[in-house]
Amino acid sequence: MNRPLILLAWVFATVGTLCLIGFAYSIVSEIRFLRHAVATEGRVVGLPNRSTDQPIYLYEFPAGTVRRGRSLGGSSSDQYLNGDRLPLYVDARNPDSAQIRRFDHQWLLPIALGTFAAVFGGIGYGILGYRGRRRDLERRIRDRGVRVRADIVGILPVSNIMINGINPWRIQAQALIDGKVHRFASGNLWFDPSPYLDRNQVDVQYLAEDPEKHWMDLTFLPEYAG
């Protein structure tokens, strides 16, 4: 697995982790707010920069005490005009803290952060987890795998994978094991190995109980600088 892909996986995993922290914080904050929230009503008195989804509003809480608030988030479905009535939640412990009483104003941010956490974290940790499992499997194969000399039968590009505009290559080999032909493929190589192959055979180790789990010894190839 090449370095750019691993670096990208770490970036995705980090972004996913930060989004997960933000998701947890926003959920806890909203639950705490709603636990002490009181339903009331306000009135739109301003639309900053002609934005119709982030109105400035006035509300009374407690009765007789006029307070001013502003929505910092909205959606395309929010279309407010001066004088419109607004359903509000007000924090009884902190009357200066108010929110428009709508599902998206309470839960849009946690949903967005949770989605980003799942997508970025899933991709990042998925790649890193796969890499870790591959390393463990390779270690197990190298420790107790059966070694065989396999004939190199082809070198093929992997068309369904592309990183930075480059498709990896795999060396294909085969060997006769217990009277049956078994095919083996190398891991992804991020350069064409053809000019550096000075042999017709390659060493392969495989698990006796499952020859499909194998490792091809390509230590004779030069190291990729990318």
Image (spheres, grey):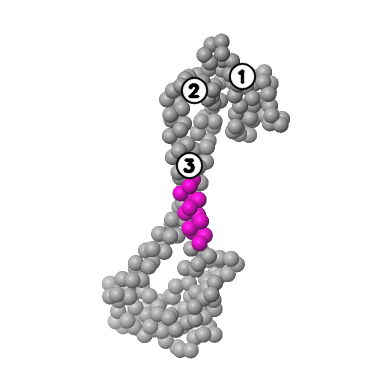
In this picture, is 226 found above or below 130? below
Task: Residue type at mark 1: give it.
Answer: Leu
Identify residue for label 2. Answer: 94
Q: Report the Cα–Cα distance between label 2 and label 3.
A: 23 Å
Residue 52: horizontal and vertical position, in percent? 67, 29
Between 102 and 7, the one nearer to me in the picture? 7
Q: Earlier in the sequence, mark 1 or mark 3?
A: 3
Foreground tag (1 vs 2): 2
Left or right? Give the position of 47 relative to 89: right
49 or 141: nearer the viewer: 49
Q: What segment carries the magenta color?
A: 7-19
Crowdedness near tag 2: few (<14), some (14–19) or many (≥20) residues, C-alpha within 10 Å: few
Indicate the amino acid at tag 2: Asn
Q: Secondary structure at mark 2?
A: strand
Query: Neighbour class for label 1 at 10 Å: few (<14), some, many (≥20)?
Result: some
Residue 164 quadrant: bottom right
Is 14 a magenta residue? yes
Helix, strand or loop status at disc 3: helix
Element on which disc 1 rests? strand
* Tag 1 near tag 3, CB within 8 Å: no
Q: On the image, numbered disc 1 is attached to which residue?
A: 58
Q: Which residue is mark 3?
A: 22
Q: Is residue 86 above or below residue 131?
A: above
Q: Quadrant of the C terminus?
A: bottom right
SS assignment for the magenta stretch, majority: helix
Rounded to the nearest angstrom, the CA distance separating label 1 from label 3 is 29 Å
In the image, farthest residue toward the right: 50
Question: Residue 181: horizontal and vertical position, in percent?
Answer: 36, 80
List x then y, in percent, for residue 155: 50, 79
